[in-house]
Every structure is written in structure tokens, then in C-alpha cells.
Image (spheres, helix red, strand yellow):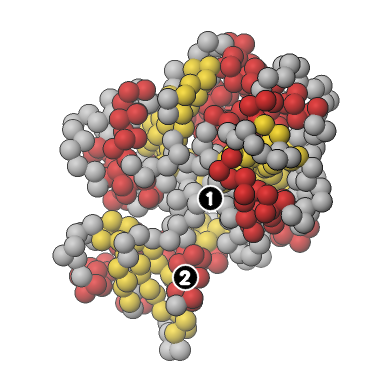
Amino acid sequence: MRVEEFLRESARKYPAKTVLVAGARRLSYSELNDRSDRLASALYDQGIARDDRVLVFMDNCPEAVIAIFAVLKAGAVVVPVNASVKADRLGFLVRNCRARAVLTLARLKAAADEAARGAPDLGLMVVSGNAAMGEAVSFETCLEVAATPPAHGGIDIDLAMLIYTSGSTGEPKGVMMSHRNVEAAASSIVTYLDAGPEDVVLSALPLAFNYGFYQLIVTVRSGGTLILEKSFAYPYAVMEVMRAERATILPLVPTMAAMLIQMKDLGQQPLPDLRTITSAAAPLPLDHISRLRVLFPAARIFSMYGQTECARCTYLPPDELSIRPESVGIAIPGTELFIVDDDGVATEPGVTGELVVRGPHVMQGYWENADATSHALRPGRHSWEKVLFTGDLFRQDKQGFFHFIARKDDIIKSRGEKVPPLQIEAVLHDCPGVAEALVVGIADPVLGQAIHALVVPSDPALTQRDVMRFCARRLEDFMVPKTVEFRSSLPKTDSGKPSRRLALAAMEEK
């Protein structure tokens, strides 16, 4: 099934039902289906054809949702780009995928115009919210055309989405996901979350990121309602929206969890309708999990692990959370996982190695990057298949549950030992007075790499000595941070995930 059919099917079943809430604005399934049909027709009239790449350069707003489905209905490939992206990076993306069009907002047009320079393939810019746009086409005018989306003849092995990685190991890479890939991932997520038309999802995650994108796709696939927030900067306001809209599902990243557990005066049942909390961007510290369970005792908490290259890999069934809270769980339905050593041989339980993913949700490859594709997608158990080598270190326990250790590139080599920073961060998050923590390795002439901890304190009385003493009681000597630095916030990616790469880059600039 092609992804746009999710919307068409739900619009047939629930035409008058609200699919989207964004501030004071609401769209029903029928309205979203009609408006995306109209925009798809306008894109076709402007020359957008099957397989063309179209950037959706917007924040979390109704126009972004309309645009995503319109691009797919036109038979083109949607390239979601976060609104915080600067002109130089945007220009790289436009040129790299040879985009034919950019759909954006008036306040972002200057960046889009700058990015368009030197991009000969870019022939169309559609802008929402500005009457005087020069050569750009009005988004609002596009919604006035007849709703006759083109019969593009596309099938489910066509590309649906080109979503770029953060570029943590060099230039961003375009992850190619077919309609079949997206459908497989969404259907699996719907299955293990038991998502249905009664669900109301509140998402403050950017639509331009994998975790946020699938909040939209899964919601529409299951016939639910999505509340889009532009950010989680004002958590009390977000909580009020959740109460008013009777939200049932809340996707989190660790930073959002840290903000929630520090909130005071939430009451005994702050969100009585909340039944599911998910976390997929990075492992939640155990302290965060335990405190979330106290705050929201009726909610199931799903710890998950995923990559842009396959959307999701694992989930931990909520009834296992008390037994093995440090695990990220088992393979999502319809997929298979195994761990291999440096020679590609499957490991025994308890042995650390690289996680390999097998399933219909695995990407088609990286856009026009054969070397990176061949490194990530390698021959599997059968001659006719390719499997995803994640670059992440895991171990599997005897009961079959997977445990994330670290990114291969994140391992700190100190005193001749290989130190996973996540293990130190778990201890730091248990330290009284610590709200957030991030561990990096910095060059040291004696140790090779010294362990440096960045800490956001929640207690102003906390000292670096307190942190180091706490670590010394809980960690082996070679794992105790050599230095502790207090910060008001951690460096984060645009999706809100603490970033070692950004932390190290900022330290090198000093």
C-alpha cells in the first residue's frame, strides 16, 4: 500500500472526525484529504512529476501535514526539512537530492531563496502566508484549484521519503524509504502500541525527524487524532492542552522526560486519559523511567530503539519494564534482529557486538552514496537479501532481550579500556541533584582519552566534587570522570537529542 492511501482510507471511514489539532486550528479527515488533493493537483499543474523530490521546509503546522500528503499524492518523494535548518545546509539538501520544488512558510522564504541559488533543478517554490512573494506560488491559492489529484501510476516500491541524517559522521546522508518501507514500519508500530481510532497523540517532535514523522503516519494509519505542538519549551502549557484534548499517547525524548519529572504541583492524576508513553530517540535513564511511572501510574511506558535507516528496531513490552528496565526490548513485529562480532559471525547471548536488522522496514540505501550504502546494507543469511548493519553495539540476554551499549563511534578508549559513555551517564542520572548528563571522551596525553562529564544540575547546591564522589562509589576507577563541567543546558540536535558530536565541536572551538 502507498502511504497516501492511509489518509484516503481513514477519510472514507471517519470523514468528519478531527485528524489534526494545531493551536486553535483543526482539520477533519475529509478536510485534510480534500486540501492535500487540491495541493497535489496544483503541484502537478506546476510540473511536479512522479519520483521528483520535493522539500517540505516547515515547522509543525497544518500546512506541513497537507504538504506531506500532497507530495505523496502527486507521486513525488517528500523530503521533510526542519524549520531550524540554516540556508547553507538547506542549500546542500536542495542540491544533493536535486529537488524540483520547495514548500515553505513566509518567514522561512529568505533562507529558501538563498538555498535556491546554485540549484538549477529547483523550478518551483510554494510559500504559505505571504501575499507578495515575487516568483513564488501561493500555498493558499493552490488550495483553491479543483481537487483532481493526478493518476501518477506509482506503486509501493517507489520512494516515498528521503529523510536526511544529522550528519554526525560527515555530510548528511539521504535515507531512501519506499512506500513499502514506511507502510511496514507504521503497521508494526500500530500493532505493538495497539493504536486505534480512539487515540489522541500529542507530539512536540518535529515532523522533519523520523520519530516525529511517524507520529503523523501512524496516527493517520490508525484513524486517530494528532495534536501538533511546535515545541516542548513550555511544558505546563502543553500539559493543559493534553488535558483539554484528552490525549492518550505522549512520545518523548530524554530532554522532555527530564522537564516533566522536574515539574511541581502536577497533582495525583495530572493526565487521567494518558495510556501510553513512548521513547525512541535515545535510551531513557532509569531514574527518568521510575519517576515517570510515579507521575503517570496508569500509563504504559514503551522504551524503544530505532534509526532513521529503519524507523524502529525494538520495543520493550511495558509488563517487562519492572523486570528489565535497562533493556530496549525485542524486535518489532514482522522483523528480525541479531548481533555479530567484528567478523560478521553471530554472537552468543551476553556477548557484545553490532546489531543487525532484517525486515521490510529497512531502507533502500543512501541517496546516490554507494560507498555508505554498501557499508550499511550487506548480504544477509540469504543470497537475495541485504540487511542493515546499524553501527550500534548491543548485547542480547539469555531471555532474548536486547541491551544498547553504545554507538561504535562513541566508545571512549581510556587507560587501555573501552568505556561505553551510556553506562557512566546512567550513574550520573542517579546522582541526587543531576537533571541531565552527557559524557564525552577528550584527548589526553596520558590516558589516551579522558572522560569528561557535562552535567545540568537541578540542585544549585550540587558541586563537581559531589558528582565525582558519587561516581567513584558506583563505577570502576577507569570509568570515573576525570572532569565534570556544569552547564545550564546540554548541546542538542534539532530533534532534542543530546549530542556528543555537538558537545565536542563546541569544546574544540574554545
Q: Is residue 60 visible?
A: yes
In the rendered view of the protein, which quadrant contains the N terminus?
Answer: top right
For marks 2 and 1, give the one nearer the viewer. Answer: 1
The residue that disc 1 covers is 84
Residue in the foreground of this view, choosing between 342 and 223: 223
The x, y position of residue 393, in whole percent, is: 53, 59
Residue at image point 31% right, 61% down: 488
Residue 477: image tag: none
In the rendered view of the protein, which quadrant contains the C terminus?
Answer: bottom left
| Badge 2 element | helix
Residue at image point 45% right, 50% down: 496
Q: Is residue 322 visible?
A: no
Residue at image point 78% right, 46% down: 122
Label 2 neighbour load within 10 Å: few <14, some 14-19, many 20+: few
- Picture layout, residue 74 above or below residue 419: above
Marks 2/1: CA–CA distance: 19 Å
**Disc 1 residue type?**
Ser
The x, y position of residue 302, in whole percent, is: 41, 38
